[in-house]
Image (spheres, coloured by chain):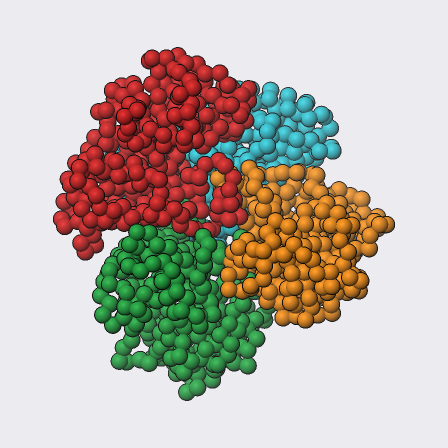
Chain colours: A orange, B red, C cyan, D green
Amino acid sequence: MIEAGIIGGAGYTAGELIRILLHHPEVNLNFVFSTSQPGKSLSSIHQDLIGESDIQFTNKINIQVDVVFLCLGHGNSKKFLSENQFSENTKIVDLSTDFRMKAEDHEFVYGLPELNKKEIKSADYIANPGCFATAITLAILPLAEMNLLNDEVHVNAVTGATGAGTSLSTTTHFTWRDNNFSAYKSFGHQHLHEIGQSLKQLQKNHSSEINFIPNRGNFSRGIHATAYTKFSGELEEAKKLYNEFYKDAVFTFLTEEELHLKQVVNTNKCILRLEKFGDKLLITSVIDNLLKGASGQAVQNMNLMFGLDEKSGLNLKASYF
Amino acid sequence: MIEAGIIGGAGYTAGELIRILLHHPEVNLNFVFSTSQPGKSLSSIHQDLIGESDIQFTNKINIQVDVVFLCLGHGNSKKFLSENQFSENTKIVDLSTDFRMKAEDHEFVYGLPELNKKEIKSADYIANPGCFATAITLAILPLAEMNLLNDEVHVNAVTGATGAGTSLSTTTHFTWRDNNFSAYKSFGHQHLHEIGQSLKQLQKNHSSEINFIPNRGNFSRGIHATAYTKFSGELEEAKKLYNEFYKDAVFTFLTEEELHLKQVVNTNKCILRLEKFGDKLLITSVIDNLLKGASGQAVQNMNLMFGLDEKSGLNLKASYF
Amino acid sequence: MIEAGIIGGAGYTAGELIRILLHHPEVNLNFVFSTSQPGKSLSSIHQDLIGESDIQFTNKINIQVDVVFLCLGHGNSKKFLSENQFSENTKIVDLSTDFRMKAEDHEFVYGLPELNKKEIKSADYIANPGCFATAITLAILPLAEMNLLNDEVHVNAVTGATGAGTSLSTTTHFTWRDNNFSAYKSFGHQHLHEIGQSLKQLQKNHSSEINFIPNRGNFSRGIHATAYTKFSGELEEAKKLYNEFYKDAVFTFLTEEELHLKQVVNTNKCILRLEKFGDKLLITSVIDNLLKGASGQAVQNMNLMFGLDEKSGLNLKASYF
Amino acid sequence: MIEAGIIGGAGYTAGELIRILLHHPEVNLNFVFSTSQPGKSLSSIHQDLIGESDIQFTNKINIQVDVVFLCLGHGNSKKFLSENQFSENTKIVDLSTDFRMKAEDHEFVYGLPELNKKEIKSADYIANPGCFATAITLAILPLAEMNLLNDEVHVNAVTGATGAGTSLSTTTHFTWRDNNFSAYKSFGHQHLHEIGQSLKQLQKNHSSEINFIPNRGNFSRGIHATAYTKFSGELEEAKKLYNEFYKDAVFTFLTEEELHLKQVVNTNKCILRLEKFGDKLLITSVIDNLLKGASGQAVQNMNLMFGLDEKSGLNLKASYF
């Protein structure tokens, strides 16, 4: 059994990790570190866990675990790792933005399996992708692979309220968000950096703009994204190209039917739909922001790092309704 | 024109009052007092008001207004009035719990028009009823009038998230409340006091229990309540009794059809439905918690105090969808 | 008093018209024609109307009314008018698509007051704009006025479930739509025709594409639209241009704050926000699809046709929560 | 591997069964019979299943399967079994109401494991309990075991829209149900029969009334029920009694914390909370209506019938948000 630890156990992504790891056939949840909740049972915070685990949050770290997941606020992972040292054999999956951009001073591999599966398998440190970045990158990456991203891409995406984290704010108050909709951070979302990095990894000369308008949806889980750009080929060529690119992906699928968000909610899937209108290729992409967009993908990366079945522990029942 | 002021202008009930008073044909909104927002436009907080008013929140009180509405937290109205004095002619409508229970040390009239219309017309000070209290009292008051409340009453009611006020809390976070449901304060809700007082006003010997389970619903506005108790008569007798009791009520109606919450959302109505099952009379009652359960009823009381048409400014379009 | 009739009384837009007209100070609701519900009370279908009206649906038409609103399915207005003739003095407001495109065989004026106020005032027949068309046209019309629409416009908009009408379908089933999101009719929505016609009315040479992705949101009322295009000027120039264009508009406003849908739900307003990013001007536009996008605008048109205050009967309280 | 078939594959409960059985470690989904969808892929109806199965709906039945689940409308199971015969060794789990009441003419065991685990283990035919019946029976069954149900029980419960099935109706239309609430079938819900039968099985003399008001909630999944009745003992006695009664239950738990619906949504759990107020014991009970209230419990019964781990295939990740 792989001994796993979680750092920062009270948030949404930690909760999802716990839910997955408790039933993962190859993993034992060794500890869940929380400075705010030590001594409390996991189910006192993640209240669905009643009957599933007797583990308590701890403020002690076991540095000998096989893998540790960092579920800290952005900026805090780097700080945490500078102050805490794990054993040589401990692999790390970081869910923050801290190590997503390649840099001289770290060896984290960007953990998007559809892009970097080989590198992930031999990596010790994984920077887990952002949720919007996952949905959008998977929507256009096959075009970059073929050097076809030479015009602007127009992206509009909507995320559920869990995307904003557990902290309370005006726009996550129920009375505000219920039956509401709004755009935010238009043309300036922080995930554009990692999207650009991934595209450039495949298409060296990529320099056209990604125009991205994120929106707050009045639902809890999921991201629905549409992206379109000029594409001179036929729709069938695009489908062939995408199917080829994703032939080894175990969670990313193309559909020929109408696509809606709840097809993927509470699963680790990304489903894509391709359509052609005039000279534009439209790609619709849906994921669960907390799973394929965070904790599910983190476990997928762990599976790859440890040579397990990539889907182990991730055959999740969609809630669907 | 009646000059009106509002004390405590940033909350939900103040927002609703402003929305109503701005279009009330007999009222001029003289000032909106807010210690937290002075100098800001009303629409900076109540953001739907764009294009409707140029008024700004003020930290100065005009003590000469004809009527002032207190939209302060429970406990703060008493404190505010001890520290601030209005003109002799200023009428006061208090939306807090502070003066709802009759006492030697105040002259506030309990502002439920269906119970106290005559007293309200000649009152200078009104204690505006609570939202649950309004929905539940209106459901059973006609029975008290006939001294028929001699057995336990079983009440279950659900309220929207606006019932919890603007402050942020776990149970008003969208991710918690969305598609969720929970009971709270079972058998101990604070509104039981004013309900009991109203019942005793009509049925002197009333002493049977009101078993009340409040619930948090995943919607923003409204209260849906069911109440049942033993009733030996026929259903038609009950209907006759209720119709007689509410014959002068301008916002409280009986329906013969199935009843649902959205029939009253964004209106000042209370709709009641009566059914008989075995020896039990079941009364279903729906109101908008912010209107008939707060600000709408406050304006209804103001209309009565000033001898206006009771419905003036309150012919509100239901949102319905 | 203006005597008004409604043809096709059981749907959403008819319900909203009834709600508005019952409280309109200058209108008497003369009849509501319905082939499916004759003899039933209005409140049996529009169940919030309890206590507001004793009118029943009728299958008889009064051809002498001053104004008639056609709330029929698309295609049925033309058919209805070919089979029924009103008096010479009866003005007609049609809410369907049937007469929105100018044509030799009809004299309907396109009823967007921000574009055609003068023509509407003297018109006898009004083709009331579509909901998406209203939100999107108002977002970009000032640019057309200045001949500035020379590049593609990228529009993404989301509509509530009332946009799909009363008929039951998979995508309006609660279990499907709740917490869901999906795109539909991408690049091919029928409202693109009337949008194009309005733009060309102001900018004769307009020929660049309007790329429009409509989406189904999990809320009941409202449209939130974002539109962006190249704009070489400064943001302040754009704001000045828009403010000038809408200086006589009584329901269309610019805001400097963040914008969200519920600012306009249950009102007849359109609120716009302008932002500039790089060489792009982003316009966000929100309306209530059933009011400014349908029945509210229909009454606004009626007010103009009869020389009433344009806002008469339309000072609606936002539900906001 | 156990070969399993499903009869009536297009509805909600069939969809949930498919989702569970596709990942059940001991089951092979042999066929899904549907008269309406033969030849179509499962994912064309249950659209989350993309990438999980290539099975198609069939109109041919394999009568040799080890177990068959009947997901037919109420009344249709009896008819189906009279027209179709399975092999001697085929076990049957019926999800309809048809065989829930004991009768001379059938041998179905009522499949509530907390009540009949021993009988289920040796049964060939299981009548799977109703959703409301499961939530309510589990709330009060321990009292019946001790012959303590001698006074009226007051039950109020709210169900999600999936409880109404896939058929389209006014009250499952999104525009009706969104942000709405309503009671229905008060004092007369059909599940009262099976609840009464279960109570009498433990408390022979049970004859006091179960006053039950069901409600339609504006969420998709889940049942939240409160039940209270007179209880002369201390709260701790009640807790002891419940803990003892449920000591062998693998999905039914008591909690000491506040309880809310989403703790169990998308799981097979039932969580109960006990409180004492005056002379009343209040029990709150939550389940997922489609899992513990239908398909999850059906698989739990299958596990018991085949001697598998009772939780096999049912360690489901809660959606929680």
Q: Residue at x 76, y 62 (%)?
A: A90
Image quadrant assignment for residue A19: bottom right
Relative horizontal placement of residue B255, taking residue C303 as reference (left or right): left
The reply to whether residue C293 is visible in this rendering is no
Q: Is residue D319 above or below residue A278?
A: below
Depth order, front residue of D13/D250: D250
| Residue B108 percent coordinates (x, y) | 30, 25
Q: Tell me which residue sits at (76%, 50%) in the image.
A: A83
Left or right, residue A216 beside residue A122:
left
Q: Locate residue B211 relative to residue A56 in the image: left or right.
A: left
**Toward which corner of the image does residue B141 lie, by quadrant?**
top left
Q: Position of residue C50 (x, y in %)?
A: 28, 38
In this image, C53 relative to A218: left or right? left
Considering only vertical position in the picture, is B288 above or below D100?
above
Q: Position of residue A193 (x, y in %)?
A: 75, 45
Count of labels in the image? 0
Give the residue drawn at x 44%, y 66%: D252
Picture coordinates of residue D151, whole percent (x, y): 24, 60
